[in-house]
């Protein structure tokens, strides 16, 4: 099998040193086999290792190669659809528990960083930026909704207040989430992997899974070996392919594009974001950005349905950046990259089981940094026989895309066009 190519991103260029890891080349036995060394797999594996389980992780490329090492690096609370939508999809008891977990991901990340000394440039605070008066009303509703679930970290910002945080004329207001924040996402994944290995866990890289033989135990096969395990956790998300077709039918890989400017220098960087907060706007096809530790602006936005790689990422993203910060017209772009996330039709995450002993989590729909850590805890607890959290997520309905694989891209793109038009018209 051809090795998956390294990613030419600023994250990869600034990654912490990491050990080389073996390719699976034998038949081995373990308690739990985790497929995928992104946040979902690593979070699950680390929670299990802390509980004393023997765990093996299989990764088709390298740790954090997928979305976990390419995303915007923003700690964003709740889910891609907010808690009022969640409440309409499940029981009152499940909705209450899902509401409690909606704000847990950031706390798990901070606990990991502190406990294991992970160097990932963790910064606190994030802004939701409103471009239209309608979006201000939505943010006011969100603040009331989150407070009803016990979360009191949102601060409303008027136009003057948001301009003190973001040096642009683009926004009419917003909210500051004091429980949000941002990180170097690849270094977080690398740190979690090393934390897992420090507890005796084993990660095999360049060991793509070709087949899962269901049974008790299950057998997970790669080109060079196999893992026999009591439990299997499927955490491939947007890079799972057709390994489990029943999961692929209920989700769609989507690409998002990111650029990193040349270093701006501390003074110029602070002129854009004086308090080093991360920002995302409230549009359906949203922009998101933040500063790096070496004072670059990392700016992302847009969606490519079906996860095609655009030929010229800078041409797509630079105009978005300049619409927000026209003062950067002469700034050079050093890096551009794309990464895939997995969208579901409902934009709600999917957690479930296949048979008795194969668990999966997928479909973060753009909220993966925090949700994956919540999912990892829920999957790990389910393997330990504590199913309350798992069952709350599993109660959310999973819908196949209308028309199957052939029509899911045009269908979703048409819906995105509608919501993008609403954003532009401010209705």
Image (cartoon, grey):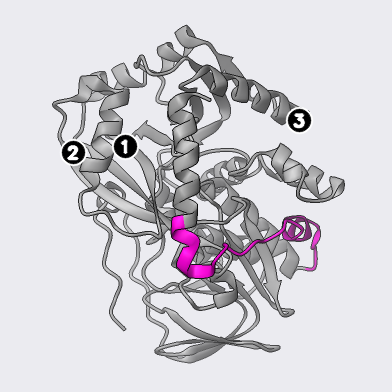
Position in image of residue 97 (x %, y %): 79, 46
- Residue lying at the far top of the rendered structure: 160
- At label 1, counting other C-alpha atoms closer than 10 Å, the crowd grade (few under 14, some 14-19, many 20 or more) is many
> Which residues are drawn in magenta?
385-410
Position in image of residue 200 (x %, y %): 54, 70
The residue where tag 1 is placed is 298
Position in image of residue 126 (x %, y %): 50, 29
- Residue lying at the far bottom of the rendered structure: 27
- Relative to 242, is 318 on the left or the right? left
Image vertical order of residue 252 relative to residue 277, above or below: below
Disc count in the image? 3
Residue located 72% across and 58% down the image: 397
Earlier residue among tags 2 and 1: 1
Q: Quadrant of residue 324?
A: top left
- Label 3 secondary element: loop
Image vertical order of residue 401 relative to residue 167, above or below: below
Q: CA distance from mark 2 to mark 1?
A: 10 Å
Earlier residue among tags 2 and 3: 3
Position in image of residue 75 (x %, y %): 51, 39
Q: CA distance from mark 2 to mark 3?
A: 42 Å
Q: CA distance from mark 3 to mark 1?
A: 32 Å
The residue where tag 2 is placed is 333
Q: Nearer the viewer, residue 376 or 21?
A: 376
Residue 45 seen in the current view: yes
The residue where tag 3 is placed is 150
Q: Nearer the viewer, residue 136 or 405?
A: 405
Q: Nearer the viewer, residue 50 or 383?
A: 383
Contact (CB < 8 A) between labels 3 and 1?
A: no
Residue located 31% across and 84% down the image: 1
Contact (CB < 8 A) between labels 2 and 1?
A: no
């Amino acid at each position: 099998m051809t090795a998956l190519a390294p990613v030419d991103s600023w994250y990869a260029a600034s990654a912490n040193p990491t050990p080389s890891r073996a390719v699976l080349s034998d038949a081995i036995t373990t308690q739990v086999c985790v497929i995928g060394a992104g946040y979902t797999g690593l979070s699950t594996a680390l929670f299990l290792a802390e509980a004393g389980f023997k765990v093996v992780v299989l990764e088709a490329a390298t740790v954090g190669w997928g979305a976990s090492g390419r995303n915007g690096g923003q700690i964003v609370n709740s889910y891609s659809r907010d808690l009022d939508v969640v409440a309409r999809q499940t029981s009152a008891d499940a909705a209450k528990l899902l509401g409690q977990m909606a704000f847990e991901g950031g706390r798990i990340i901070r606990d990991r960083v502190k406990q294991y000394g992970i160097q990932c440039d963790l910064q606190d605070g994030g802004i939701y930026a409103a471009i239209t008066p309608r979006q201000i009303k939505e943010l006011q509703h969100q603040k009331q909704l989150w407070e009803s679930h016990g979360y009191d970290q949102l601060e409303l910002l008027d136009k003057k207040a948001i301009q003190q945080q973001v040096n642009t004329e683009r926004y009419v207001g917003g909210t500051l989430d004091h429980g949000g924040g941002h990180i170097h996402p690849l270094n977080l994944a690398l740190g979690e992997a090393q934390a897992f290995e420090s507890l005796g866990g084993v990660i095999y890289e360049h060991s793509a899974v070709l087949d899962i033989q269901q049974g008790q135990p299950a057998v997970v096969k790669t080109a060079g070996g196999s893992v026999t395990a009591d439990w299997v956790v499927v955490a491939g998300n947007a890079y799972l392919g057709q390994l489990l077709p029943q999961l692929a039918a209920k989700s769609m890989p989507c690409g998002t594009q990111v650029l990193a400017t040349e270093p701006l220098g501390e003074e110029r960087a602070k002129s854009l974001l004086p308090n080093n907060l991360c920002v995302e706007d409230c549009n359906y096809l949203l922009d998101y950005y933040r500063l790096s530790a070496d004072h670059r602006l990392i700016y992302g936005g847009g969606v490519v349905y079906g996860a095609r790689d655009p030929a010229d990422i800078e041409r797509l993203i630079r105009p978005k950046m300049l619409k927000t910060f026209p003062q950067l017209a002469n700034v050079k772009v050093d890096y551009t990259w794309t990464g895939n996330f997995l969208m579901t039709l409902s934009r709600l995450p999917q957690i479930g089981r296949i048979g008795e002993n194969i668990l999966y989590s997928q479909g973060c729909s753009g909220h993966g940094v925090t949700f994956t850590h919540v999912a990892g805890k829920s999957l790990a607890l389910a393997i330990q026989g504590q199913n309350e959290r798992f069952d709350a997520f599993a109660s959310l309905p999973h819908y196949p895309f209308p028309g199957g694989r052939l029509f899911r891209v045009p269908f979703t793109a048409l819906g995105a066009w509608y919501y993008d038009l609403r954003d532009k018209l401010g209705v």
